[in-house]
Amino acid sequence: SGEFAGLTAIVTGGSSGIGRASAEELRARGARVAVLDLDPSGLADDIAGFAADVSDRASVASAVAAVADTFGGIDVVVNNAGIGATGTVADNTDDEWRRVLDVNVVGMARVVSEALPWLRRSEHASVVNVSSIAALNGLPGRALYSASKGAVLSLTLAMATDHVREGVRVNCVCPGTADTPWVGRLLAQADDPAAERAALRARQPIGRLVTPQEVANAIVYLASPRAGSTTGTVLDVDGGVTRL
Ligand code: NAD
């Protein structure tokens, strides 16, 4: 039972943070959930893990085929896997550009292209891509990461247009600073992690970080049949940062 009853969802990067919260929320609402992650261990018993690297076509193709084989189809794709990068254009090497764009942008195109034959057959096909406030705000010292997330936003709009007549909706969310293991790792590098966390919190208009659950709620809404007429949209879950 639940609004996703009978539907199968793939969540990339679903072993941690926003992806993990999304996978669990989809499961709680009745979806069969497959997590594609570099490390698919430590998942809840009722979530299926598949080892996959979104930067590797053969790996994505075999994992998507295994999901379809296991569950009989694919209805929802949450493209969440992504990596960070710091630096201005003065800092990043060509190899860093290729690597981050390959994971963050081409990775999403790979997963969707492999899943499309199944999505086209679904009555409730939906893709949700995880972009970032970095796409909208030109975050300082994050040129490469911002460019990758800007590309995710544009890819969302283009795919929404390309596939709307095939019954495939495509939307994206732009999270602000969300309290995930990723952000925990960044804070741990600071001289005084507790002070850095307090400063980060103080910079948020809502006075706290975004929770992974709040981002998952937006993702799951866009993925759900309730959002059946919504495609090509960008939903900010950013604690007010972008509009300030
Ligand atoms: P996280 O590091 O906690 O989790 C990311 C997951 O993706 C991990 O399980 C990791 O193993 C997996 N992954 C990484 N590279 C992969 C690859 N090549 N193939 C398959 N899986 C891979 O990160 P998070 O904070 O939950 O971020 C998730 C997404 O949200 C990312 O796309 C990130 O850019 C975006 N985002 C995060 C924030 C934030 O503040 N945390 C803000 C805006 C956007």
Image (spheres, grey):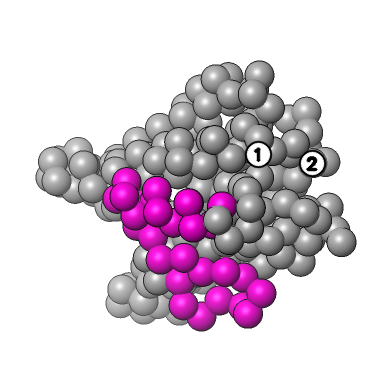
Q: Picture coordinates of residue 202 (x, y %)?
A: 55, 62
Q: Is residue 241 something that shows in the picture?
A: no
Magenta-colored stretch includes residue 55: yes
Callout 2 secondary element = helix
Q: Residue at x 40, y 32 (%)?
A: 151
Q: Residue at x 47, y 27 (%)?
A: 154
Q: Residue at x 79, y 41 (%)?
A: 225
Instruction: Report the span colored magenta.
Output: 40-68
Check the picture and name the quadrant holding the C terminus: top right
Callout 1 secondary element = strand
Q: Picture coordinates of residue 162 (x, y %)?
A: 55, 20
Whether residue 233 is situated above or below residue 40 in the rendered picture:
above
Q: Is mark 2 within 8 Å of ligand 1?
A: no
Q: The disc labelled 2 sits on which kind of residue?
A: Pro
Q: Quick one: 58 or 172, which is closer to the camera?
A: 58
Provide the residue designation for mark 2: 225
Relative to 141, is 15 on the left or the right? right
| Location of residue 191 (image quadrant) | bottom left
Q: Quick one: 54 or 91, which is closer to the camera?
A: 54
Q: The disc labelled 1 sits on which kind of residue?
A: Ser
Magenta-colored stretch includes residue 27: no
State the CA–CA distance, disc 1 to disc 2.
9 Å
Residue neighbourhood size for the residue with mark 2, other residues' Cα within 10 Å, grouped as few (<14), some (14–19), many (≥20): some
Say whether disc 1 or disc 2 marks the residue closer to the N-terminus. 1
Whether residue 5 is situated above or below residue 183 in the rendered picture:
above
Which numbered disc covers residue 126? 1
Q: Residue furthest right?
A: 1
Q: Picture coordinates of residue 140 (x, y %)?
A: 34, 44
Do residues under tags 1 and 2 come within 8 Å of each other at their CB atoms? no
Q: Picture coordinates of residue 119 (x, y %)?
A: 61, 38
Q: Is residue 24 something that shows in the picture?
A: yes
